[in-house]
Image: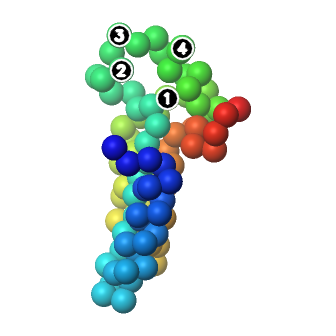
């Protein structure tokens, strides 16, 4: 398991290391995603796990990933698709 800080540091470090070789390194950090893994969990409870009060859909993760694959000048970034949960307690 990699912590949030580890993902950020690793992504930035690798991006700097490989930038001269024209490699881009980015990451998508999802929060709670509406998948079969969440079956049996209360949707109302899951919505309380992020400040925006929703649950990400798979399409939200796909959209972030597609953006990163197409954005040629973006490297060293972590896109959090978690309804702002990564900023801490609220």
Q: Position of residue 71 (x, y in %)?
A: 43, 71
Under circle 1, the secondary element is loop
Mark 2 surroundings within 10 Å by alpha-carbon count, few (fewer than 14), some (14 through 19), many (20 or more): few
Q: Is residue 72 visible?
A: no
Under circle 3, the secondary element is loop
Residue visible at 41% across and 32% down?
Answer: 33
Report the quarter where the N terminus lies. Answer: top left
Give the Cα separation between the discs numbered 3 and 2. Answer: 6 Å
Q: Which residue is mark 3?
A: 40
Give the Cα separation between the discs numbered 4 and 3. Answer: 12 Å
Give the Cα separation between the discs numbered 4 and 1. Answer: 10 Å
Of 16 and 51, which appears nearest the observer?
16
Mark closest to the chain's N terminus, 2 or 1: 2
Q: Is residue 75 visible?
A: yes
Q: Which residue is mark 1?
A: 55
Dots 3 and 2: beta carbons under 8 Å? Answer: yes
Give the Cα separation between the discs numbered 2 and 1. Answer: 10 Å
Dots 2 and 1: beta carbons under 8 Å? Answer: yes
Q: Which residue is mark 2?
A: 38
Dot label at residue 44: 4
Of 2 and 56, which appears nearest the observer?
2
Depth-wise, is mark 2 or mark 1 nearer the camera? 2
Dots 4 and 2: beta carbons under 8 Å? Answer: no
Mark closest to the chain's N terminus, 4 or 2: 2
Q: Position of residue 24 (x, y in %)?
A: 36, 74
Residue visible at 39% across and 27% down?
Answer: 34
């Amino acid at each position: 398991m990699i912590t949030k800080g580890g993902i950020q540091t690793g992504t930035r470090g690798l991006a700097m290391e490989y930038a001269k070789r024209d490699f881009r390194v980015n990451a998508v950090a999802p929060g709670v995603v509406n998948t079969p893994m969440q079956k049996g969990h209360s949707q109302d409870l899951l919505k309380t796990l992020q400040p925006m009060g929703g649950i990400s859909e798979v399409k939200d993760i796909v959209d972030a990933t597609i953006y990163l694959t197409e954005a040629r000048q973006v490297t060293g970034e972590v896109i959090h698709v978690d309804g702002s949960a990564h900023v801490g307690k609220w």
